[in-house]
């Protein structure tokens, strides 16, 4: 059962993934009974973010808080500045990068969540200490959490 939740700024569980600075797991599967996920994603300048992919079962939404995020949505690219919002229905190809030379902050939301926090935790483990996982490792990990490269 879901209960009200408050997570102060700069607090909560977090994961460090490759060239992101930190991803806060603000609202997880357990917190929302699997209904919704909310993540605060801090990216270093020119961080690669997520290559184009789809989710077969989840809708993903993004809100740019800080910086310039280049979104790939379908076959087009757009640059989102603070206040920009992107809604990606399931099955639609998308990805993102920090194209700016400053830190960026991106809010990422999933509905339904399908244990997405474990996706981020797993990426943290796969890329710990500068490790570069193989394409096969990444694809296997992604598929567990409804993410498929395009």
Image (tube, rainbow, N blue to C red):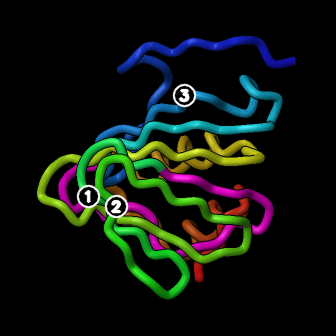
Image position, residue 45 (x, y; %):
18, 55
Q: Which dot marks residue 68?
A: 1
Image position, residue 104 (x, y; %):
27, 48
Instruction: Examine the structure image and report whether residue 98 is included in the region drawn in magenta.
Output: no
Q: Which dot marks residue 26?
A: 3
Instruction: Answer with the quarter of the image where residue 1 lies.
Output: top right
Q: Are marks 2 and 1 in contact (CB under 8 Å)?
A: yes
Q: Nearer the viewer, mark 3 or mark 1?
A: 1
Residue at (70%, 12%) from the top-left corner? 4
The residue tagged 2 is 80
Image position, residue 92 (x, y; %):
65, 75
Q: Please state the extent of the stretch shown in magenta in the rendering.
A: 43-62
Q: Are marks 3 and 1 in contact (CB under 8 Å)?
A: no
Question: Which residue sits furthest right?
Answer: 1
Image position, residue 143 (x, y; %):
70, 65
Question: Which residue sits furthest bottom?
Answer: 75
| Placement of 10 over or under 48, stated as above or below | above
């Amino acid at each position: 059962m879901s209960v009200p939740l408050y997570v102060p700024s700069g607090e909560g569980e977090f994961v460090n993934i490759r060239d992101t600075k930190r991803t806060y797991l603000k609202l997880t599967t357990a917190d929302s009974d699997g209904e919704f996920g909310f993540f605060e994603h801090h990216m270093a300048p020119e961080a690669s973010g997520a290559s184009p992919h789809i989710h077969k079962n989840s809708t993903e939404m993004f809100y740019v808080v800080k910086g310039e995020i280049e979104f790939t949505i379908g076959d087009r690219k757009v640059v989102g500045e603070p206040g920009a919002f992107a809604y990606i229905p399931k099955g639609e190809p998308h990805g993102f990068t920090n194209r700016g030379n400053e830190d960026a902050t991106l809010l990422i939301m999933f509905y339904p969540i399908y244990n997405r926090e474990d996706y981020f935790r797993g990426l943290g483990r796969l890329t710990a200490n500068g490790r570069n996982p193989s394409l096969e490792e990444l694809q296997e990990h992604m598929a567990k959490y409804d993410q498929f490269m395009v």
